[in-house]
Amino acid sequence: MNIDDYIVATRQINNDVSESLAQAYLDIYVEILKGFSFNEFDFPELLVVNTLNKQTQLVSFKNSKILICDQYLGQTINELSRIFYSAESPEDAKSMVFRIMSETASYCGENEVAVTLACLYSTAHHRSHGYKSNETIELRAKRLLSVHVQEAFIIAHELSHLSWALSNIDKTAIDWLLDFVLQVSDIDVEKVLEQYLDDLSFQYHGNPVPHAHNIKTDEDRLRDVKMRERLRNEIIESHERTVELHCELSKNDHFREEIYADWQAAQTCLELFSDTMPADDLIIAVHLAMENITTISFIVSETYSLLNLQIEYDSRAVGARKRALRRSLEQWVSEHVPSMQDGCLKFLADSNARYMNLVRDPMTVTIASDLISFGLLDEAIVKSMYGDIIEAIPNASDPQFIIKNRPFK
């Protein structure tokens, strides 16, 4: 078996690799390698593929190391980034859920599910895709630079795993970051409880009316006492779970390695692009890399669950990695662009809020609600929908035909 046979056996080919993009990957790969202290025997060979698996990974093959770089992962990140920069409605992101899930079902061998999801992608896309026409020349330029940084981040992340395995680095260099992410302060339960109740009251009234102002009768007071007791226990239990999780993660070597790989990938990108991009655009691009990768991974994991398959995805560890990356970005700004230090927290917070509102939340809510409403958890309904689809449209038994042509409106 050669490496091409390995790719065919482990992935589903999407399209041929673009020669121009393959050269672009090689160019950025050479630049990234300059930041790593590998000897010539440790340099992985670069292999660019285009597969529905959307996975860039470092593999050992016949005593050689090969970095498999997936062009289609870059294309998917490009589409999510286009939504991030140009969408005005949360509806624009919803179709991407069905597309990613359909592609995942395809390479898992579940063609009926893949076709049904592709059909849902087609109809959702026609309902809302304003982001495509909203993109200005300025936003397009910003997106293309951002995607370039994100793909560099992914490559550097994989190379960082190799550095870790070869012990080419000081593994205590990220202890400060682990301490920051895993620290758990004592909480003032009553203060947290009061803040939560006040927030609920503000939302209910539409103006800042404290919860205490809602307590007017003996019946209100009795109900309030019981509610406070329940919420107090929930807050304490939640805090205890957080302490337990952080204790587990602090002893988890894989988690430490991921934190290091994220940190090193960020440092590589910040150094590589700091002279060619505005600092705020660069920071947001690195932040987007983590958001897009983890969003795709989450949707893939949900598809596996739908198909009763297993895949590793720990949302708690992912959340900790995101916090660590944001902290390392803040640290870099304080050291290299101190004039932006005060503004860094704001534009990172704004970027996170925009991604949450226009990309992440619409996609994850779609999984939670639309799949159930369409009956995709019921095998009989899927078979029925599949039968209707392939009768209605020629070539509709191929989910990629549907995704590329979008015949259903």
Image: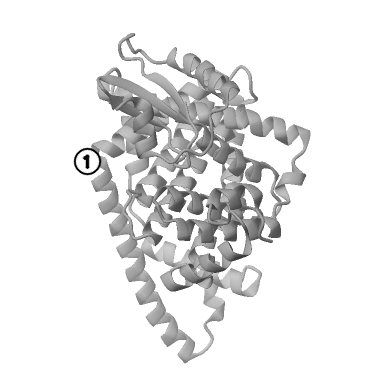
Q: Left of 64 or right of it: where is 55?
A: right
Q: Quadrant of the N terminus?
A: top left
Q: Where is residue 364 in the image (x, y as percent from the top left)?
A: 51, 57
User: Residue 38 location, x and y as percent?
Assistant: 34, 13
Q: Residue at x 27, y 44 (%)?
A: 249
Left or right position of 218 against 226: right
Residue 143 is drawn in which quadrant?
top right
Q: Which of 204 and 98 is in front in this view?
A: 98
In the rendered image of this protein, does residue 41 appear above or below residue 383?
above
Assign the C terminus to one quadrant of the image.
bottom right
Relative to the observer, which residue lies in front, 224 or 38?
A: 38
Q: Left or right: where does residue 277 sit relative to residue 220? A: right
In percent of width and height, residue 404 lies at 62, 47
Label 1 crowd (10 A; few <14 / some 14-19 / many >=20):
few
Question: Given the image, on which type of amino acid does mark 1 rest?
Answer: Lys
Q: What element carries label 1?
A: loop
Front residue of this view, candidates 121 and 233: 121
Q: Is residue 120 above or below residue 223?
A: above
Of 233 and 125, which appears nearest the observer? 125
For image coordinates 54% across by 86% down, the residue present is: 216
**Residue placed under numbered mark 1 in the picture:** 251
Quadrant position of residue 46: top left
Q: Quadrant of residue 45?
A: top left
- Residue displayed at 58% across by 47% down: 355
Figure label count? 1
User: Relative to 350, is 28 above or below?
Assistant: above
